[in-house]
Amino acid sequence: MGLISLLSSNPTAFVIVAVALVLSLTVHEFAHAYTADKLGDPTPRRLGRVTLNPLAHLDPFGALLLLIAGFGFARPVPVNFNNLGRWGMVAVAAAGPLSNILIALICVLLLKFLPESSLGDIILGIVSSINIVLAVFNLIPIPLLDGSRILAGLFPRTLGRSLIEFEQLPYAFLIVMGFILLARAPLGNLIGTVQGWLFGLAGV
């Protein structure tokens, strides 16, 4: 179910989820761009991606998918891995999911100080859940996702380059979409497990 169904049933929840998604995706892509920039790759800065302006990161088709299908994506940050080296590539790829984990952790810790079922409690719960989903999903090692690029940096150079080149194939996007559709149930279980662990760790 996409966000569009939430708009008719609960407009307030729609606004909260939509804003949380936009901001979380923006921080995710900014983290990639900022890390690449600091490690010596000028590509993201040259393309105006080292910014927290959501307009620089949102993808129209990815946003449409969120509205209709309930999953989508932001515009990936272009980087030149030749400027980064092996471990730089790993750091840039990991920066996005790590930023989402940090946001989720901060939200969960703040939940301890808010009354249950208050508006703040609900908003923090939604933001933490969204960021856990983004972190877990992006760490899956399949093409176009951060997990694949982390593996590419850890693998020997030839194999790593093959993984990066595979992302350029026209059907790589279809692989990701097919995986989402086929693995929704196990992915949901994994995300629920991570969320439960994080909430338990924070004592919420």
Image (spheres, helix red, strand yellow):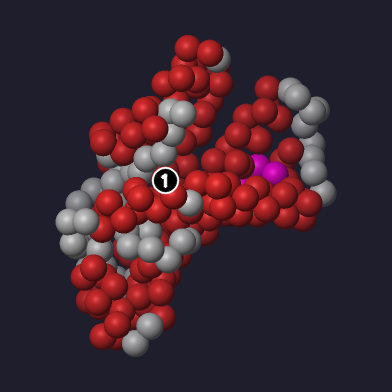
In the picture, residue 46 is in which quadrant? bottom left
171 is higher (above) or lower (below) than 122? below
> Can the viewer see residue 143 in this picture?
yes
Residue behind mark 1:
181
46 is higher (above) or lower (below) than 53? below
Q: Position of residue 199 (x, y in %)?
A: 74, 48
Q: Position of residue 95 (x, y in %)?
A: 45, 61
Please identify the dominant SS of the magenta region.
helix
Number of on-image labels? 1
Task: Give, as a three-letter code, the residue at label 1.
Answer: Leu
Magenta stretch bounds: 104-108
In the picture, residue 107 is in which quadrant? top right
Q: Residue at x 80, y 28 (%)?
A: 115
Q: Position of residue 183 (x, y in %)?
A: 48, 51
41 is higher (above) or lower (below) than 127? below
Q: Residue at x 72, y 55 (%)?
A: 197
Badge 1 element: helix
Q: If the image is split into quadrants, where does the C terminus sit?
A: top right
Q: Position of residue 193 (x, y in %)?
A: 68, 53
Specify the farthest residue to the front.
182
In the picture, residue 112 is in which quadrant? top right
18 is higher (above) or lower (below) than 73? above
Q: Residue at x 62, y 50 (%)?
A: 189
* Label 1 Cα crowd, 10 Å radius (few <14 / some 14-19 / many 20+): few
Comparing 126 with 186, the one in front is: 186
Task: Look at the image and say whether residue 113 sits in the magenta stretch.
Answer: no
Is 130 left or right of 72, judged from the image as shown? Answer: right
Is 82 left or right of 181, judged from the image as shown? Answer: left
> Can the viewer see residue 105 in this picture?
no
